Amino acid sequence: MNHPRHSRIRTIGAAGAAALLVLALGAGGAAARSERASAGITVFAAASLAQAFPAIAPDNTYSFAGSNTLAAQIQNGAPADVFASANTTIPAALYAQGLIEKPVNFTRNTLVMVVPKSNPAGIHSIYDLAKPGVTIDIANAAVPVGSYTLTVWNQMGLTSRLMPNVVSQEVDVTAVLAKVANGQADAGFVYATDARTAPNQVTVIDIPAWAQPKVVYAMGVVSKSPNQAAAQAFVDRVLSKAGQAILEKYGFLPLNAPVPSVAKIRPAKGKPGTKVTLIGSNLGDVTSVTLGGVAAPFKVVSGKEIVLTVPAQAKTSAITVTNPNGNFVSKTRFAVVAA
């Protein structure tokens, strides 16, 4: 079975010719996928960017791995022109050490849970992972995706229940996805952008919106780069309208995407089971609707309209609408009346 992005390749070419070979890059034995073209700068980038970055600038040399692994390589003097991380803390640390120029945020992502397509353990929510015998694969805590995973578990109060079921902690997000796709684990946590590369091998299970971490990517020019102008040009290209469009094509989220807004709630009251129409803006990518913390089933009609069903457990409260960019909380409370 072929698995998404499991090979780590380097392409070396003169004008009109190219050859493929396997290249191992790593700190402490960790391997990094690398792609090399005949011209361009050297970019060290988070593994989750392995499809998007070459689409933005195909003539660069790329090394893709866990952000922490790449940062360690830069600290040890590895030649690179740009460093791009799946979080903001690692670039900030390198900047404080004088190893990269001031980093800039350039995109966002979301964390999801994945299970093998056959789902042999019958996993349907994150809470099912606490069942005895369930095997979980995650990235280690030093890797951004591993840190985000633990943030979710902590926010949901599940850390002590899930850690005993963790069977492996990987060096990057690609390794987690590969093991779940291979059926070597019942579930794993990856970025949404990685999960979409394996639609026939894994099933995505969303994390509750209220527990979703803020996954922000940052990048910076390496201070000792001999190609400062070209490196900055690449950063500018990623930040450009065209670069952002390519990132969105691969599932990444814009930095300043709008949060949902609701102008009208019709009707303003109702019993459990009542259909309620919300009219507003930026409603096309809503991930959850709640009444006083109780999840309400909903259907997206358009970017300006969604219809929710008042849940049985709901009480009179504000309505909260969430998309990947933030929340809207109604100023008026929806009145839940007795059935």
Image (tube, rainbow, N blue to C red):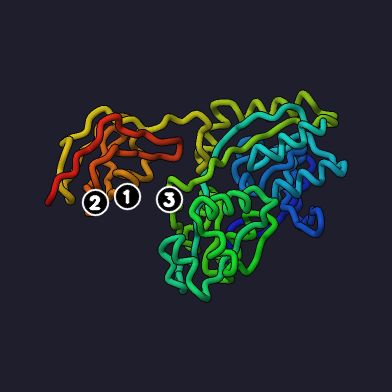
Q: Is residue 194 visible?
A: no
Q: Which numbered marker is on residue 87?
A: none
Is 321 situated left or right of 137 in this image? Answer: left
**Residue 68: image x %, image y %?**
73, 47
The amino acid beneath tag 3 is Pro
Please name whichever residue, 297 or 284, is drawn nearer the observer in this view of the structure.
297
Going from N to C along the chain, the mark reached first, 3 or 1, is 3
Place residue 77 in its image quadrant: top right
| The N terminus - image quarter | bottom right
Q: Which residue does the numbered mark 1 point to in the structure image?
A: 295
Query: Label 1 near label 2: C-beta < 8 Å?
Result: yes
Q: Is residue 323 visible?
A: yes
Disc 3: CA contacts within 10 A as few (<14), some (14-19) or many (>=20): some
Give the residue furthest to the right: 77
Q: Which residue does the numbered mark 2 point to in the structure image?
A: 311
Distance between the Cα atoms at labels 2 and 1? 7 Å
Q: Which numbered marker is on residue 208?
A: 3
Please name whichever residue, 175 or 35, is drawn nearer the observer in this view of the structure.
175
Q: Residue at x 45, y 57 (%)?
A: 204
